[in-house]
Image (tube, rainbow, N blue to C red):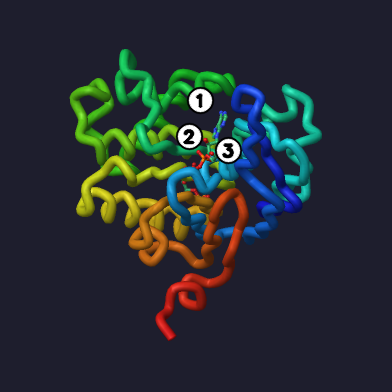
Amino acid sequence: MISIKNLYKTYDQGGRKVEAVKDVHIEIGKGEIFGVIGFSGAGKSTLIRCVNLLETPTSGSVKINGVEMTELTDPELRQARRKIGMIFQHFNLLTSSTVFDNVAAPLRLVGISKEQIKKRVDELLGLVGLADKGGFYPSQLSGGQKQRVAIARALANEPEILLCDEATSALDPQTTDSILELLLDINKRFQITIMLITHEMHVIKKICDRVAVMENGRVVEQGTVLDIFSNP
Ligand code: ADP
Ligand code: ADP
């Protein structure tokens, strides 16, 4: 489903080269929940943003279902991204739009009827447990509720992949657990492949099948969560 090979991303920080991602190889199968863990600055965010080409890799290969993402034209990339949802630490909602309009936004880009949009948004808000919040603004919601809106928006076009960039890092432990439960539920229900990055071991242990540990841009360990984190 996701195949990352020989991936490098180098930033130029005012003349100084920073290798944020170095020689990363990761294969993620359909329906898997794959976690990437590491300290701040390890390169996790850069890596996950290379999967949907929010960052352009310096070199290497990113294939989604066999399609080389780095070689797509802009229109092809826009099309490919519809099958890749993404959620973020700070939710990235449109603050001056209602919950309904936030979730409807990606549907309005694909040209379906108003009635179909209404039906789909209602279905999505039901799925994330916010059926009664369509008319609210993000500022009227808790952090956990905002992330639920972001999840509904990410699922709008029925993606095959969900990328989660520190999706629970701004949430308290209880809310974190409820969001992780929701992600597990979505993974099971739709066989969505999930790639997530986090600095929290708890997140990995709770929902991931396999994990990669990143340090200074490199993957230093990779395997099942049991293999990597069981104490000998
Ligand atoms: P993490 O997500 O693990 O905290 P990042 O991928 O954000 O790590 O950062 C990895 C390295 O790349 C850091 O040294 C960071 O300063 C650098 N970096 C990240 N984004 C940029 C950017 N847009 N421009 C320059 N350097 C960057
Ligand atoms: P069916 O085969 O009966 O349509 P699905 O499980 O495929 O059953 O779909 C049930 C509902 O879930 C549909 O409304 C569909 O739009 C929605 N759905 C299916 N796949 C996804 C997905 N990947 N992300 C979000 N919603 C989805």
Task: Measure the alpha-carbon separation of dots 1 and 2.
Answer: 7 Å
Task: Measure the alpha-carbon separation of dots 2 and 3.
Answer: 20 Å
Where does the C terminus fall, quadrant-wise?
bottom left
- Residue 157: mark: none
Visible residue check, residue 135:
no
Residue plotted at (50% across, 25% down): 106
Q: Is residue 182 left or right of residue 24?
A: left
**Crowding near the residue tagged with mark 3, few <14, some 14–19, many ≥20 C-alpha atoms within 10 Å:** some
Q: Which residue is situated farthest in the top direction here?
A: 96
Q: Which residue is mark 1?
A: 107
Nearer the camera: disc 1 or disc 3: 3
Residue plotted at (40% across, 81% down): 231
Instruction: Kindly identify the amino acid type of the residue bearing the numbered disc 3.
Output: Arg
Name the N-terminal-most of marks 1 and 2. Answer: 1
- Residue 49: mark: 3
Q: Position of residue 18 (x, y in %)?
A: 62, 37
Residue plotted at (27% across, 26% down): 134
Name the N-terminal-most of marks 1 and 3. Answer: 3
Instruction: Kindly identify the amino acid type of the residue bearing the numbered disc 1.
Output: Leu
Q: Is mark 2 within 8 Å of ligand 2?
A: yes
**Crowding near the residue tagged with mark 1, few <14, some 14–19, many ≥20 C-alpha atoms within 10 Å:** many
Quarter occupied by residue 144: top left
Q: Position of residue 69 (x, y in %)?
A: 74, 38
Q: Which residue is mark 2?
A: 156
Residue plotted at (77% across, 40% down): 59
Nearer the camera: disc 2 or disc 3: 3
Q: Position of residue 167 (x, y in %)?
A: 38, 43
